[in-house]
């Protein structure tokens, strides 16, 4: 088993769930919830996809062994979405049936636009059979406003993020101020109509906007939570938690860390500076 190179350790908690659980325990001690993600995506062969199903199976059982404030996030291309739709759904069903039995939430991450429709369709189907699924939507996509209506009709459990993949202008807003405006518009609708809404952003403008909206509309605490990625803005996690809002950190682990790590570097030049600074220090 390989280990995570020191420069990626800021964003990736470890190569196995033992390492990830030590992060879960530290965050739970601070009354912060964790969503654990096994790293891996665009899997092209069935045995490899099944290996990841085994990993989630074991992970869910381990989470349930002790009372932990922890759930999981998952990418459908890890379960075989690129291979065969039904094969992927069977794998997802196996994970969701364990999650339902153990009462653990499962969020379906959203990948590039080649997968948007298929991910939503699979979530809609799963939401009819299982209680655990939630889904991520991306505020930069032009289609998201309509997709929100579908999610509210399915089970209304949603995480809204800006969107991390490079998409063409026919499909996605390109300028940050427009993405932020759209995020604010969509999150209001979700906070008023969604069952459980995860506000996934490190952006102060969005966070302050949501806090004001939640207070002005008396949105109950069990209907929303703030979410950030492991390695980003730790002081802000505690500040939000101290104000009494629920806070969840997305904590990835696993050996396939490169694609996730590259997206984090692409998002913010400060993340690249952090890595360079530490390269020169060592
Ligand atoms: P962004 O990087 O746009 O920064 C905006 C502003 O926030 C900055 O100008 C600064 O003011 C502040 N800021 C941000 N980071 C800071 C820092 N480290 N220190 C100080 N200030 C900082 N994407 C996707 O496509 N599919 C998915 O399934 C998910 N899942 C997901 C889960 C969770 C929990 C999160 C938080 C995010 C995702 N994402 C995602 C990623 C998401 O789409 C987006 O790419 C990143 O969150 C970056 O956008 P932000 O709004 O967080 O801040």
Image: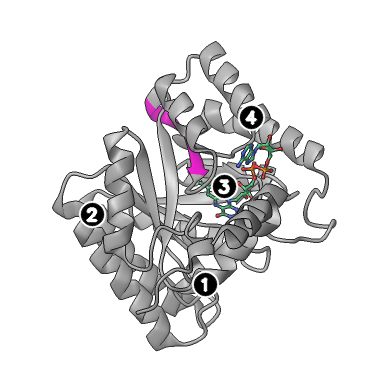
- Quadrant location of ligand 1? top right
Q: Which residue is mark 3?
A: 150
Whole-angstrom CA distance, mark 4 to mark 2, is: 32 Å
From the viewer's perspective, is residue 79 above or below residue 65? below
Whole-angstrom CA distance, mark 3 to mark 4, is: 28 Å
Q: Earlier in the sequence, mark 2 or mark 1?
A: 1
Mark 3 closeness class: few <14, some 14–19, many ≥20 residues within 10 Å? some
User: Which mark, by number, is residue 63?
Assistant: 2
Which residue occupies 59% across, 49% down? 137
107 or 257, which is in the foreground? Answer: 257
Q: Which residue is mark 1?
A: 41
Image marks 3 and 2: residues in contact by CB distance under 8 Å: no
Indicate the quadrant containing the C terminus: top left, top right, bottom left or bottom right.
bottom right
Question: For the residues carrying marks 3 and 1, which lies nearer the camera in this image?
Answer: 1
Q: Position of residue 42 (x, y in %)?
A: 55, 76
Mark 1 closeness class: few <14, some 14–19, many ≥20 residues within 10 Å? many
Callout 3: helix, strand or loop? helix
Q: For residue 238, which quarter of the picture? A: top left
User: Which mark, by number, is residue 204?
Assistant: 4
Disc 4 CB within 8 Å of nearest ligand 1 atom: yes
Residue 226 painted magenta: yes
Whole-angstrom CA distance, mark 3 to mark 2, is: 30 Å
Image position of 274 (left or right of 47): right
Task: Pick out the residue farthest to the left.
Answer: 65
Which residue occupies 38% across, 68% down? 15
Q: Position of residue 19 (x, y in %)?
A: 31, 60
Question: For the residues carrying marks 4 and 1, which lies nearer the camera in this image?
Answer: 4
Callout 4: helix, strand or loop? helix
Q: Earlier in the sequence, mark 4 or mark 1?
A: 1
Residue numbers of the magenta segment: 222-228
115 or 1, which is in the foreground? Answer: 1
């Amino acid at each position: 088993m390989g280990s995570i190179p020191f420069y990626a350790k800021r964003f990736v908690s470890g190569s196995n769930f033992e390492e990830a659980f030590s992060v879960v325990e530290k965050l739970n001690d601070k009354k912060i919830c964790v969503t654990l993600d096994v790293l891996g995506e665009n899997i092209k062969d069935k045995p490899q996809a099944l290996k990841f199903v085994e990993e989630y199976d074991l992970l869910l059982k381990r989470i349930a062994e002790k009372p932990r404030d922890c759930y999981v996030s998952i990418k459908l291309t890890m379960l075989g979405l690129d291979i065969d739709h039904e094969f992927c759904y069977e794998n997802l069903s196996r994970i969701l049936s364990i999650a339902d039995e153990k009462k653990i939430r499962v969020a379906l991450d959203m990948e590039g636009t080649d997968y948007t429709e298929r991910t939503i369709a699979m979530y809609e189907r799963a939401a009819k059979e299982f209680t655990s699924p939630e889904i991520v939507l991306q505020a930069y996509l032009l289609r998201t406003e309509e997709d929100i209506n579908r999610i509210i009709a399915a089970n209304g459990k949603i995480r809204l993020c800006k969107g991390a993949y490079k998409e063409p202008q026919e499909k996605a807003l390109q300028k940050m101020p427009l993405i932020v405006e759209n995020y604010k518009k969509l999150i209001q609708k979700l906070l008023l109509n969604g069952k459980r809404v995860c506000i996934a952003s490190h952006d102060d403008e969005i966070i302050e906007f949501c806090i004001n909206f939640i207070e002005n509309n008396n949105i109950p605490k069990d209907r929303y939570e703030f979410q950030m990625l492991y390695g980003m803005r730790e002081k802000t996690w505690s500040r939000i938690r101290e104000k009494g809002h629920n806070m969840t950190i997305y904590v990835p682990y696993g050996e396939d860390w490169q694609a996730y790590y590259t997206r984090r570097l692409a998002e913010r030049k400060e993340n690249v500076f952090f890595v360079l600074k530490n390269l020169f220090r060592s």
